[in-house]
Structure formats: C-alpha cells, structure tokens
Amino acid sequence: MDIETFVERSFGEWRSQRSAHHLAFAHFEEVRSTINIEALTVDEPGVLELCQRYKVSPDEVVSPFKMSWEGESDWDEEQVIEGSTILVPVPDSATTGKLLREQGYAETMESAGTYCITDDGTFILTTAYERAAAEEKIWFATPDLRFRVSLIKTSSGKGVTTASFSSEVRRGVKS
Amino acid sequence: MDIETFVERSFGEWRSQRSAHHLAFAHFEEVRSTINIEALTVDEPGVLELCQRYKVSPDEVVSPFKMSWEGESDWDEEQVIEGSTILVPVPDSATTGKLLREQGYAETMESAGTYCITDDGTFILTTAYERAAAEEKIWFATPDLRFRVSLIKTSSGKGVTTASFSSEVRRGVKS
C-alpha cells in the first residue's frame, strides 16, 4: 500500500476508544473521542508553512491532510480534549518518507517523523522529540475499522513509559 | 525469529494490563493480571493428550509450554479471573505452524490455531471457533515488555466484536 492509498482510506469521521497504559504505575486511562480526517490541498497556508519550516518543496508533498479531534478522558471528565493538526507526507519512495506535523503527540510542538508502510499494510511512524520518542502503528482491520498502537519512549528509545491502543470505527457504520 | 526463540523469550512472570474495547457499545473493560509462562516437556501428560486429540506425533512438537494467569476485571472486582492452559506448537517451517491449545480464548474449548512469525518478529495466531474467530498479535518492544492485540471476530471473519490490548511487563523489571 502506498501513502496516498493509506491517507485516502483514513478520510472521514471516526469514533475512537483509546486506552492508555501508564506502565510504571500500571494505571489505565480511557478516552472516547471523535476524530475527523480530511484532505487538504498543497497550497493551503498551513501546508506551505510546514514546507517552508522544514525546507521541503511543495512539489515533494503528497496527500496533505488535517486531523481534528474532540473527546473526553475518564481522568478528568470536565475537561474536553480537542485540537487539530495538519499533517504533510513527504515520500522518498512509495512506502517510506517523512511526515511533517504541526503539533506532536508527546510534546506540544511541531515534529518531523519518519514513516514506512509494511508489506501487510501497517503504517509505522517514528518521531524523535527533545526529551522523548514516539512510535505509532496504524492498520486497518476492515475499511471501517482502524487500530492504532502508540508508544511513548524515553529519548534513548530503550524504555517505554506509556503504551496506548485505539479502536477507531467509522462513524455511521456498525462495527 | 523462529518459534523456539519466541517461546523462550516469553518464559517468566509478567504483570499484565489489558484493555478490552467492546466495539458495538464503545465499552471499556480493564483487567490487571499476573501471567506465568513456563516450559513443559513433550512427555507431559497434557501435551501428549493434545497430540493424540489432534493426531500429531510428539516428534513434531517444539517448545510446549504452560500459561497461567490470575487477575481481576473492573467489571466485577469481586471475581478473580484465573486459569491455565497448555500450548503446543507444531511447526511446519521455522516461522509457521499450528498451535494446539487446551482451552481457547473466545470460547471455553480446546482449539488448534495457525501461527506465523513475521519478518519484524510479530507472532500472529489465527483461530477459528464454531461461532467466532480470534486473531492475536504478540510482539516484544524490549526483552522485558511484550504487547498483545487480540481481536474477536464474527465467524465470517468480517466483523470485529471485541478488540483488546495488553501491555505485559516482566515482573521485577521497571518499565
């Protein structure tokens, strides 16, 4: 599967259940959210800005998209978690490349991660931050069901502090 | 990685956090448990019994083992979940084969599943039951940290009813 196909299969509105395991304390966190993934054009200001920041020509960009979410955690039900980010794939082959992102997961800052898509269609993204590293695996069980495993690692990459698992069901589809 | 190596890396006592996502109702279930995985010899009565049941010669068996668990679910904290099962790999190549099991996950009956180990060291087990199918992926993030994603599917294999994710940290090791 190439990156265009992977991104295209991801478009739409998803109902997400996420469980985070905080490993040192064996704590659980549960988050329910709605995720929206939509196509952007390369000439969108946010896309061009990321290109400029990372010195990438807009010609190298494929399938930029916007992801937005709104949800709540069982740790603090009063607080609504919401946000959005722009993601910009910059392939160096059909199945590998860089992913520029306005705002990262582990730290609230922009990031440039490295992705690959394995033979069995799993998208794997690795991102190094200043004080941590993140690894994310996303795969489709069916066209309307995606899974996502995210690891937050120490910056050395040796220890895992948090592992989380999301089930994402396309909105309006019975699982 | 071959099946001997995979089984050997699994021996020991593990502290497990498992989150189950019941997809139709967007329900969460949390289970904390201790899992023990230990080697058996091929001449163990339980191993020979499974061989006989599935018409497999004990010569074909590699690295039989016993898995036992004890834990509690947040759905019913009074109830202690405990059990054990014998697992018998019957390879047909270094990375593929059958896995005989005294008792399955999706239904409380014995099972014979089919496994393969991918290039990146992920063990994938597929088991067909009478009214459901199960798919389990297990991989090591570090020698002391395993992850496991289990799907319970409808017997047609098209729908997923439950997805669960386990983080397993070797006992006595800080994650």
Image (cartoon, coloured by chain):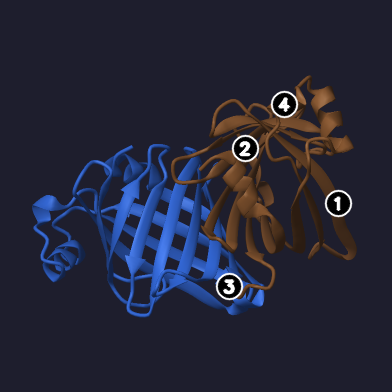
Chain colours: A blue, B brown
Q: Assess whether mark 2 and mark 3 are in contact (beta carbons under 8 angstroms).
A: no
Mark 1 residue crowding within 10 angstroms, few (<14) / some (14–19) / many (20+): few
Q: Please report the residue visible at 61 percent of the width from the left and 42 percent of the height from the top.
A: B4
Q: Which sits earlier in the primary sequence, circle 1 or circle 3?
A: 1
Task: Identify the residue under disc 1.
Answer: B83
First reached walking from the N terminus: tag 4 or tag 1: 4
Q: Which of A21 and B76 is in front in this view?
A: A21
Task: Name the subunit of mark 2.
Answer: B
Viewer can see residue B137: no
Task: Please state which of the two labelled residues, at mark 4 or mark 3, is closer to the viewer.
Answer: 4
Instruction: Tell me the chain of label 3.
Output: B
Name which quarter of the figure residue A111 lies in.
Answer: bottom left
Pointer 4 residue: B59
SS label for mark 1: strand
Please state which of residues A23 and A15 is positioned toward the viewer in this rendering: A23
At mark 4, the secondary structure is helix
Q: In this view, does A35 lie above or below A173?
A: below
In the image: residue B44, left or right of residue A108: right
Gap between marks 2 and 1 measured at Cα? 20 Å
Q: Is residue A113 visible?
A: yes
Separation of residues labelled 4 and 2 (CA atoms): 22 Å
**Disc 1 + disc 3, Cβ < 8 Å:** no
Whether B148 is drawn above or below B143: the answer is above
Tag 1: amino acid: Gly
Residue type at mark 2? Leu
- Taking the spot 58% from the left edge, 56% from the top edge, the residue there is B147
How far is disc 4 from disc 1 in space, using C-alphas? 28 Å
